[in-house]
Amino acid sequence: MSIAGNLEDVRNRIIAAAQRAGRPSSQVRLVAVTKFQPLSAIEELYKLGVRDFGENRIQEASEKLTGWSHPGATIHMIGHLQRNKVRQAVEIVDCIQSLDSVRLAEAIDHQCQRTQESMPVLMEINISGEEAKHGFQPVEVFDALPELARLNNIRLQGVMTMAPIVPQAEAARPYFRRLRELRDELERRFPDCRLPELSMGMTDDFEIAVEEGATMVRVGRALFV
Ligand SMILES: *Cc1c(COP(=O)(O)O)cnc(C)c1O
């Protein structure tokens, strides 16, 4: 299979899943996860119309993408970000989906203040509560959100999660649904705050995530097999 063939397949599956849920597929952005992939793969995807790319390590992203800028391309940080890498991250990426603490948010805000930027961010939520996962615990987000809202150089746009590894994609559905409900609850409690973005779903479960309202799916392996 080629990248072009894989991409067409993934796009068609997104369209079909959106149709099943009665949603316009234009509401779902495909974030191509290009970790471990060479820059040539990113460029090929760009030529095929992909505009959103996900990287999980700043070191790797920086080696690949320093100096690479294409009109309309958005680089998403999707892996855990250490505070001592924030300066580099702000240089390289256009969106941080893996915001997992208030202290990290303050560091990003501080760096963006210096460079007079404003960084779109998503709160990563550990919806399954697994020990090994990063992210805010669902109960923490209600206290964290007002603190994030105070920071002027980040723009909170929604929430992100990774479902646990499950034997069948269908078993991931409750986690996606829980993330959507948590987002709805946050918007109810904080009416000034809009959280339109729901980043959820990967190679093994993105169709279920689309059915549950994902606005961004993060797909790696399915594009590169
Ligand atoms: C690697 C990764 C993905 C993509 O996973 P695939 O199974 O390759 O589609 C999505 N989100 C995060 C946070 C990742 O680290």
Image (tube, helix red, strand yellow):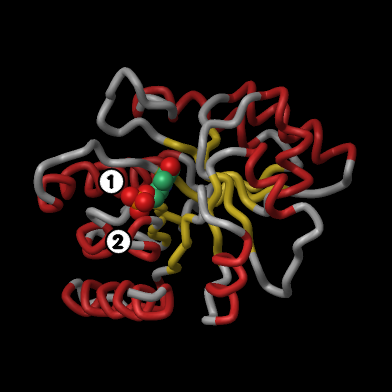
Q: Quadrant of the C terminus?
A: bottom left
Residue 187 visible from this viewpoint: no
Instruction: Identify the residue shown where x is 22% and y is 78%.
Output: 16
Residue sitting at x 43%, y 67%: 30
Secondary structure under tag 1 reads helix
Find disc 1 in the rendering and name its residue. 181
Element type at marker 2?
Answer: loop
Please report the residue visible at 43 percent of the width from the left and 29 percent of the height from the top. 135
> Is 8 located above or below residue 175 in the figure?
below
Q: Which residue is mark 2?
A: 213
Residue 27, percent from left and from top: 41, 72
Q: Does label 1 or label 2 sit earlier along the sequence?
A: 1
Q: Amino acid at mark 2?
A: Gly
Among the 4 quarters of the image, the one containing residue 107: top right
Judge from the rendering whether residue 46 lies leftward or rightward of residue 30; answer left or right: right
Task: Pinpoint residue 113: horizontal percent, then vertical percent.
Answer: 85, 38
